[in-house]
Amino acid sequence: MAVAIVTGASRGLGLALAAGLADAGWQLVVDARGADDLAAAVRQIEGAARDRVVGVAGDVTDAAHRLALVEAAERLGGLDLLVNNAGILGPSPQPPLAEYPLDVLRDVYEVNVVAPLGLIQLALPALRARRGSVVTVTSDAAVEAYSGWGGYGSAKAAIEQASRILAAEEPDLRVWWVDPGDLRTRMHQEAFPGEDISDRPLPETVVPAFRRLLADAPPSGRIRLADVPTGAGR
């Protein structure tokens, strides 16, 4: 049975992706910083997948927590998929680069760049053993110059370039940096404080495209889920 780690799975896109994988028969290791929120998410994800979802509460910036995630996956039998979804936006409202607090910028890079790379490093032996896949959630802010998005956007650009290099260095793996599009999530609301974002689709709407991506397993690269034909995934 296939095994996946999904970070930041207590709400939003991470929760939707984890639930979609569980529904497709995957075994899961999921995390979030809040133990209570994570426990509630695990109950929601499980459904018919009882005993196939392991919650590990903690912060992805903590090296010991990252190791615990990989060890939990190995206890389930190995690792086929790592989904680096956990991330932070930074200040809300977002400041221009001229006023961006550098201590906060370091936090944005720590969560969005350093932590996912650290988890990838730990997971690589298990992923290599099963010729697995790495998905790192990115954003159009990584490739477009949006005013006010300098911190988050540059961090996502950095992890995209790291993913490109990882793909070149690990040709036996599938490495995808995946842009899910604008979704109705808490982070997206934080990016637009006071604005109505009810016109954005819910995270669950991209799950069919995500599962199709895993089923089709195209070559490593940048993927916009809006461009993936929907259909049954594994």
Image (tube, rainbow, N blue to C red):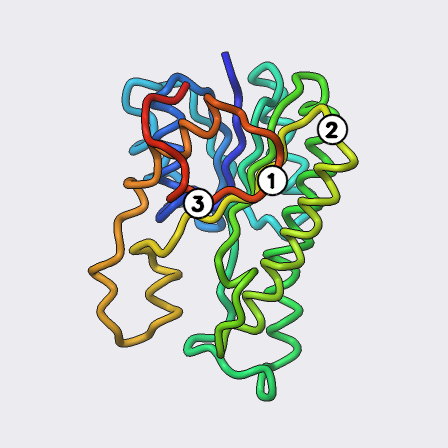
Q: Is residue 87 left or right of residue 208?
A: right
Q: Secondary structure at mark 1?
A: strand
Give x and y (percent) for residue 150: 57, 73
Q: Secondary structure at mark 2?
A: loop
- Disc marking residue 221: 1
Give x and y (percent) for residue 96: 53, 83
Q: From the image, state whether disc 2 or disc 3 is nearer to you.
A: 2
Q: Is residue 42 above or below residue 27?
A: below
Q: Nearer the viewer, residue 64 or 2?
A: 2
- Does any portion of residue 57 appear in the rendered image? no
Amino acid beneath label 2: Pro
Do residues under tags 2 and 3 come within 8 Å of each other at their CB atoms? no
Q: From the image, state whether disc 3 or disc 1 is nearer to you.
A: 1
Which of the image's four quarters has the C terminus? Answer: top left
Q: Is residue 68 above or below residue 125?
A: below
Q: To which residue does mark 2 refer?
A: 171
Amino acid beneath label 1: Gly
Give x and y (percent) for residue 60: 60, 48
Neighbor class of circle 2 (other Cα within 10 Å; few <14, some 14-19, many 20+) is few
Q: To which residue does mark 3 refer?
A: 35
Sequence-first disc among 2 and 1: 2
Give x and y (percent) for residue 225: 41, 42
How far apart are labels 3 and 1 at the CA level? 34 Å
Q: Nearer the viewer, residue 220 or 31?
A: 220
Residue at the image position 60 percent from the left and 57 percent from the top: 111
Q: Is residue 36 left or right of residue 143?
A: left
Residue at the image position 29 percent from the left and 18 percent from the top: 48
Residue at the image position 52 percent from the left and 52 percent from the top: 138
Sequence-first disc among 2 and 3: 3
Q: Secondary structure at mark 3?
A: helix
Neighbor class of circle 1 (other Cα within 10 Å; few <14, some 14-19, many 20+) is some
Sequence-first disc among 3 and 1: 3
